[in-house]
Image (spheres, rainbow, N blue to C red):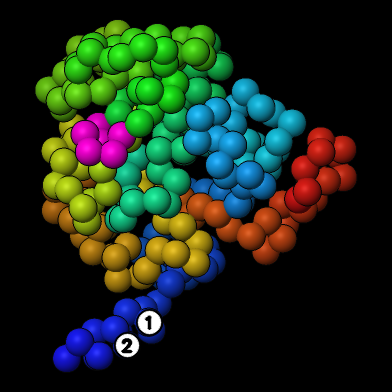
Amino acid sequence: ALAWILIGLMVRTRIRSKEALQRATGQTLLAVLPRLQNPRRFKTKLLSIDRHQDLAALEVLRQLAINLERKDTKTLMITSAVPDVGKSFIAANLAALVADTGKRVLLVDADQKRGKLGTRLTKGRLKPGEPKPSSTERLWVVSGAAPDQLGQWKQDYDLVVIDTPPLLVLAEAGRWAREVDGSIMVAWSGKSAADEIQEAQHRLELAGGRQVDWILNAVSPKSVGYHAYRKYGFGSTY
């Protein structure tokens, strides 16, 4: 029996293109994000403040920020099926880019087990449930918070971005899904499996998630034409 389980894991269908993700979810994708040149660099630093690097990824996130403003979204949850697909990176940089437009933004680190956004973006320790200014102007960060605080935050900030635990790991994301205006789910090209994605989407819908969109992360730049940015001399290898 164990052998059959291992064989099943080996042949699991991995998502490698936007078309494959669209087939798995039955939805048109919100965005396709190219793979970063140096992912480790941005574990402690925002992409938005290092603009000469990874221009293509920055432009995709900036367009997302513009779209959020057009939709008048006030609360947005960023989640995924499993860990390590870039959801926290997307949440932090999207929040910073919206703040860069002059909006007051709160970034909620709702992952109580693995969340590190507070320590990466602020100095000193965060008090649970108390927003603290980050190193980026007009961007605040909070951890140890609960969904029932959203009502007050919607009055205090122009946008609240919530980075939740993965849906297939902890049930916490479901509590936030019922309270937000929309949810973005993140998949990683070549890593995320179709069955995991479908199960996560099902759980989010059962939890009452509204306006669920998908982002495919870490796509080969050449496969989606991001190499064109090289022509503009911004130092990108795309």
* Label drawn at residue 43: none
Task: Name the image quarter holding residue 45.
Answer: top right
* Label drawn at residue 10: 1
| Mark 2, other Cα within 10 Å: few <14 / some 14–19 / many ≥20 | few
Q: Position of residue 88 (x, y in %)?
A: 40, 38
* Label drawn at residue 7: 2
For the N terminus, the quadrant is bottom left
Residue positioned 20% across, 17% down in the render: 128
Q: Secondary structure at mark 1?
A: helix
Residue 223 versus residue 29 in the image, above or below: below
Q: Is residue 224 magenta?
A: no
Q: Is residue 113 magenta?
A: yes
Q: Are marks 2 and 1 in contact (CB under 8 Å)?
A: yes
Residue 173 versus residue 138 in the image, above or below: below
Task: Name the image quarter holding residue 49.
Answer: top right
Task: Name the image quarter holding residue 224.
Answer: bottom right
Q: Secondary structure at mark 2?
A: helix
Image-based side of 28 in relation to 163, left or right:
right
What range is drawn magenta here? 110-115
Residue 76 seen by the camera: no
Residue positioned 49% across, 13% down in the render: 135
Q: Position of residue 158 (x, y in %)?
A: 38, 15
Residue 149 seen by the camera: yes
Main SS of residues in magenta: loop
| Mark 1, other Cα within 10 Å: few <14 / some 14–19 / many ≥20 | few
Residue positioned 60% across, 52% down in the render: 35
> Residue flagged by tag 1: what amino acid is it?
Met
Image-based side of 225 in relation to 102, left or right:
right
Q: Position of residue 213 (x, y in %)?
A: 38, 48
Q: Position of residue 212 (x, y in %)?
A: 32, 47
Front-lying residue, 23 or 217: 217
